[in-house]
Image (cartoon, helix red, strand yellow):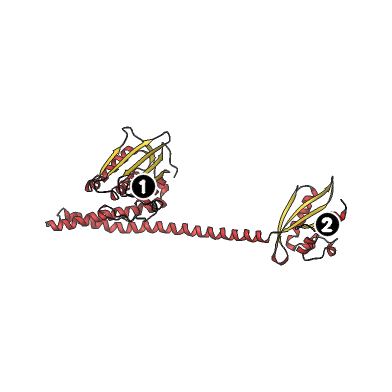
Amino acid sequence: MNLSVLEAIFASMEQGVIFIDDQNRIAYCNPVAAKIRNIKADQVLGQSILDWHPQKAHPKVLQIIADLKSGQMKGHHRMNIQMVEGRHYDHTYSAVWNKNEYLGTIVITQEVTRRKHAEDELKEALKKLEIANEELRRMDRMKDDFLSNVSHELKTPMISVMGYIGMLLKERGGTLTEQQKKFLDISYKNLLKLEKNIDNLLDLAELGIQKEFYIFEPIDLVKVIRFSCSTVKPMAEEHQIQVEAQLPSEPMTISGVEDKLNQLFDNLLTNAIKYNRQGGRICVSLDQNAESVFVRITDTGVGISHQSLKEVFTRHFQEKTKPLGKARGLGIGLSLVQEIVKLHQGEIQIESELGTGTTFTVMFLRNKEIVS
């Protein structure tokens, strides 16, 4: 293949091609390389390659050529620099050898302005995303602090009010009429509901802030579930709802925080009662396999729409269906349930059909030490 054929090949390439001799002088420059540098090819022959690079790139260019010439760098080396009119180019340097004799370096140049701009935009977007994420984390911490502070501030005077109403109901301030007792009793029960809502708010905040302070120990889920069933029994009887507990006679032990597990099942059972039917039924079962323990709570209630299934664990979510007794809460019970399940590194699933009922399944790993 003669020289004219090689020149025709290089001239037809989309990439710029420059050959640098062993003295770092330009020995060949194809038309694309000349166009990129806004020069005439025949005017640069014999000139130093550094004359056609930005000043700040000179040390790096010399180092690349020196490494290729000495054999310290094998194959090729890529460098990205900005050149004419703000355009960006990739320059790939490769040594040319004739057996053991270094002949020079060939530089292949192609424009990468679009890619460089896309990379810069991606870096900027990632930077903004990280700033936004940090702001969200900061606001989340502020929210938890706010919930915790508000809960404490509300609970302190409320305890005092409950104490005095309790004293009045015991007629320590004098004899009461039946109507007065009735009014005070209604007020006291509503304060108990308010206390529970405040406790739930406080727990949601503390689960985020103080998770590392919880002490895990072996807990028998049979005892926990039996206790929760007895806790909600009065509420169930008020609406003629039957609670069936299918529990094994032997203990089923997990590593957990007892009061949080009590709260977990109190909330699930209370929810199963609130959204049940008058005279309905709730079935609680406890099973296990070699690795996990499963708790299933199934009710014969009004069910949850498919559209709402993905939102039930969202804080402050409330289904449009009116609960029994029309006693709406703050919509944080199931959100708290999910947080407690996460605290125990478990999983919770929900299945429901409108008009049929709902099943919550909670899974815990057996004999697993929780790392907080």
Residue at 40% across, 45% down: 349
Nearer the observer, 292 or 10: 10
Residue 50, quarter of the rendered image: bottom right
**Rendering coords of residue 49 (x, y %):** 80, 60
Residue at 17% across, 54% down: 169
Residue at 71% across, 67% down: 85
**Rendering coords of residue 102 (x, y %):** 84, 49
Nearer the observer, 222 or 306: 306
Task: Determine which residue is flagged by label 1.
Answer: 352
Left or right for 3, reference 367: right
Residue situated furthest right in the rendering: 2
Residue at 26% across, 52% down: 324
Which amino acid does the dot numbered 1 rest on? Ser
Q: Circle 2 sits in a helix, a strand or a loop, which is it?
A: helix
Image vertical order of residue 183 relative to residue 368, above or below? below
Task: Determine which residue is flagged by label 2.
Answer: 8
Nearer the observer, 4 or 29: 4
User: How packed is label 1: few (under 14 Cα within 10 Å), some, or many (20 or more)?
Assistant: some
